[in-house]
Image (cartoon, grey):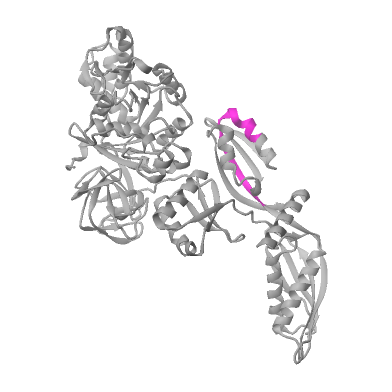
């Protein structure tokens, strides 16, 4: 592929609801541009972008794929992003590298949950948007209804730049409202717009001209005065309006029939913003600088994606915002303060890689085997280190406990987890200090399951998943005392230690306190640490269900030693048993973690969400409006929220989101505590 100047590059990401044909649209663009000679199909697992075994198996996109096409002396970098909620993190990577977000909508289904999510993601990123109404050849497809939905739900600025000729089975081509030409069939043969569509074409063109003029003071004045506006002026206004976000162009076509694809690419090349329209802010030391897409400017390239390629190794995807990156050179990772050896640079097309000598400002490519660089890092020069704003990724809402399937997998698991997190920054891994489990967090169940399949396939680590254990704790609610004498005679030196202990509850979250109140030296000072160690061991063993005991003060009040038979071990054992005896009499209770939960939902689902939370023993703290959603704040037992990501998606058709954080510990209701303790005893017996 030849080198393209910055003004001839277009970067767009395809986002939207799952199953609207984003991958098929990218595939059609590859075909009509001549990049491939046969149209791949998602259901056959033959598309250029869905090449991962998990994608072929599931027949859905899991990863964002880069697919550059050459069209009319332009390079169009298409990023095909997954639409299913579990893989939404990949859409964030695509948005970080793109200059325009193309939201793909199904003409039969209209605006769906994923359409709205994609729209808000693009708004958050503050990049120009466009809409491609796909599948106009499908049964029940209706372009006019879809446009009305786009305008009422997303924005009134959604304005058609094309109209379909026919619909459903009779779909034949599109009318381009800028050139006032028809493009018919797979080849996009030029023709005159159908006479029967004259009125619709005229009305739609007037709406487009008005929207195109709004971004240009001179043009809007001409429009208001009723003066003639030339096609060239319309084109100029259209480009300015799209870049400014005052117009969201709506295209139409059928990706699987490749109808409407050529005029769509024409518009992308002619009207979509080039990287020259994108000015980013970067940190240079403590100062903030603005970077333009200048090939001769300071080097600033951001890593937006990292993959583990079985043949090349670690592959780092870069978007150049400024400067030129050359192969076989050195660059500076400003985030890590580390020198990186830049080897061979690649232009990626799905799973194929084409070596290139350099990448210029505005372009997208990849480099293999970088040592320290990960997603979000900035590659710049040591002479002028620059740091671009980090890519924002969604927080995980679904957790699973990860276990190695065999002893051989134990050794591989930690490195596999580290590498999969490098590849997918939405995933999180941490060790729960209370349960000792390794917790793998993601967006949903499928997200975490596929991560495990990748780890097995790529890194040879077979990992099982289970529901995480709830980190229950225990405490006491009364003051109590007990004594214990450890006495054992085995011939020769025996074992002897007497310990008297008093326990009392402390306020919640106080932890553990050990106090030596012995007077008269009945327990020699050098044996006191042994008693404390014995108590500490007993705290971890628990009183009721083998959960750690917290929020307790333990006083060593008295004891007795034997001049010959006493030892540290004897006092440790006596301390442990005395604690257990006193704690059992101090009305022990079970504690459970309580989470703070914030749910953002369309108002229509508020009642169902509150009802569901009440059924989960939650305390709803408040319901308040926030822009276009309702916010529900609640405190809920963590035990009831382990699968809330799945429950909420089912309850709200995926329209609600939530955040959850640990808040405090609270006493477990008696009837539930009995079940938890019984299950813990059973687990201990079978362990």
Residue 620 x %, y %: 67, 39
Q: Is residue 190 above or below residue 584?
A: above
Q: Up-down: is 84 above or below 667?
A: above
Would residue 458 be visible to someone looking at this image?
Answer: yes
Q: Residue at x 71, y 80 (%)?
A: 528
The image quarter in which residue 565 lies: bottom right
How far across and how far down the image is residue 598, in percent?
A: 59, 41
Camera-nearest residue between 187 and 248:
187
Q: Which residues are magenta?
A: 593-610
Q: Is residue 408 magenta?
A: no
Q: Residue 452 or 234: which is nearer the viewer?
A: 452
Question: Count of labels shown?
Answer: 0
- Residue 463 located left or right of residue 76: right
Query: Residue 511: which quarter of the image?
Result: bottom right
Residue 223 to residue 122: above or below: above
Rendered location of residue 203, percent (x, y): 33, 11
What residue is shown at x 22% (from left), y 12% (from top)?
192
- The answer to whether residue 630 is visible is no
Q: Is 602 a magenta residue?
A: yes
Left or right, residue 506 beside residue 107: right
Viewer-proximal residue among 142 and 74: 142
Where, quadrant-wise, is the N terminus in this rendering? top left
Of residue 185 and residue 589, the one placed in the foreground of this image is: 185
Task: Residue 680: give x, y in percent of width and height.
Answer: 70, 58
Q: Quadrant of the C terminus?
A: bottom right
């Amino acid at each position: 592929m030849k080198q393209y100047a910055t003004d001839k590059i277009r970067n767009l990401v395809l986002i939207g609801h799952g199953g609207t044909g984003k991958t098929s649209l990218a595939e059609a663009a590859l075909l009509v541009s001549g990049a491939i000679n046969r149209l791949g199909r998602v259901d056959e697992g033959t598309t250029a972008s869905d090449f991962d075994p998990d994608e072929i198996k599931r027949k859905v996109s899991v990863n964002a794929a880069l697919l550059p096409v050459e069209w009319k002396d332009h390079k169009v970098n298409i990023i095909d992003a997954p639409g299913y909620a579990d893989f939404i993190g990949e859409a964030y990577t695509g948005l970080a590298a793109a200059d325009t977000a193309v939201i793909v909508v199904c003409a039969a289904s209209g605006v769906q949950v994923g359409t709205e999510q994609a729209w808000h993601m693009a708004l958050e990123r503050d990049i120009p948007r466009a809409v491609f109404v796909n599948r106009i050849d499908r049964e029940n497809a209706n372009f006019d209804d879809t446009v009305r939905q786009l305008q009422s739900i997303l924005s009134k600025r959604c304005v058609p730049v094309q109209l379909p000729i026919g619909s459903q089975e009779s779909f034949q081509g599109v009318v381009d409202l800028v050139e006032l030409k028809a493009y018919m069939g797979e080849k996009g043969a030029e023709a005159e717009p159908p006479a029967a569509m004259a009125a619709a074409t005229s009305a739609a063109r007037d709406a487009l001209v008005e929207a195109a003029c709004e971004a240009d003071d001179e043009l809007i004045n001409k429009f208001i005065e009723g003066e003639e506006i030339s096609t060239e002026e319309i084109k100029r206004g259209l480009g300015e309006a799209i870049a400014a976000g005052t117009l969201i162009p709506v295209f139409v076509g059928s990706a699987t029939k490749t109808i409407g694809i050529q005029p769509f690419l024409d518009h992308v090349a002619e009207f979509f913003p080039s990287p020259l329209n994108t000015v980013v802010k970067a940190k240079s030391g403590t100062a903030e600088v603005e970077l333009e897409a200048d090939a001769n400017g300071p080097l600033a390239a951001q890593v937006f994606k990292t993959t583990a390629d079985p043949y090349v190794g670690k592959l780092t995807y870069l978007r150049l915002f400024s400067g030129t990156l050359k192969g076989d050179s050195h660059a500076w990772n400003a985030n890590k303060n580390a020198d990186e050896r830049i080897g061979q640079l690649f232009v990626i097309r799905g799973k194929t890689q084409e070596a290139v000598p350099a990448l210029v400002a505005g372009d997208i490519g990849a480099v293999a085997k970088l040592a320290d660089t990960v997603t979000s890092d900035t590659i710049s020069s040591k002479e002028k280190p620059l740091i671009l704003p980090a890519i924002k990724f969604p927080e995980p809402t679904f957790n699973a406990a990860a276990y190695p399937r065999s002893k051989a997998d134990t050794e591989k698991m930690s490195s596999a987890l580290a590498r999969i997190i490098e590849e997918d920054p939405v995933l999180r891994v941490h060790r729960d200090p209370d349960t000792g489990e390794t917790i793998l967090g993601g967006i949903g169940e499928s997200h975490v399951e596929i991560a495990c399949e990748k780890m097995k396939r790529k890194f040879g680590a077979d990992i099982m998943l289970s529901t995480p254990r709830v980190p229950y704790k225990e405490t006491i609610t009364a003051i109590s005392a007990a004594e214990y004498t450890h006495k054992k005679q085995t011939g020769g030196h025996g074992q002897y230690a007497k310990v008297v202990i008093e326990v009392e509850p402390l306020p919640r979250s106080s932890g553990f306190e050990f106090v030596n109140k012995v007077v008269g030296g009945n327990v020699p000072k050098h044996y006191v640490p042994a008693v404390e160690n014995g108590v500490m061991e007993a705290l971890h063993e628990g009183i009721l269900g083998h959960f750690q005991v917290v929020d307790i003060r333990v006083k060593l009040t008295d004891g007795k030693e034997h001049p010959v038979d006493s030892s540290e071990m004897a006092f440790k054992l006596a301390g442990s048993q005395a604690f257990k005896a006193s704690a059992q009499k101090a009305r022990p209770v079970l504690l459970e973690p309580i989470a703070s939960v914030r749910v953002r939902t369309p108002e229509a689902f508020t009642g169902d969400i509150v009802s569901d939370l009440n059924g989960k023993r939650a305390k709803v703290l408040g319901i308040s409006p926030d822009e276009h959603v309702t916010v529900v704040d609640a405190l809920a037992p963590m035990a009831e929220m382990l699968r809330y990501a799945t429950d909420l998606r089912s309850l709200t058709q995926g329209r609600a989101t939530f955040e959850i954080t640990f808040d405090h510990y609270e006493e477990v209701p008696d009837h539930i505590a009995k079940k938890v303790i019984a299950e813990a005893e059973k687990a201990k017996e079978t362990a």
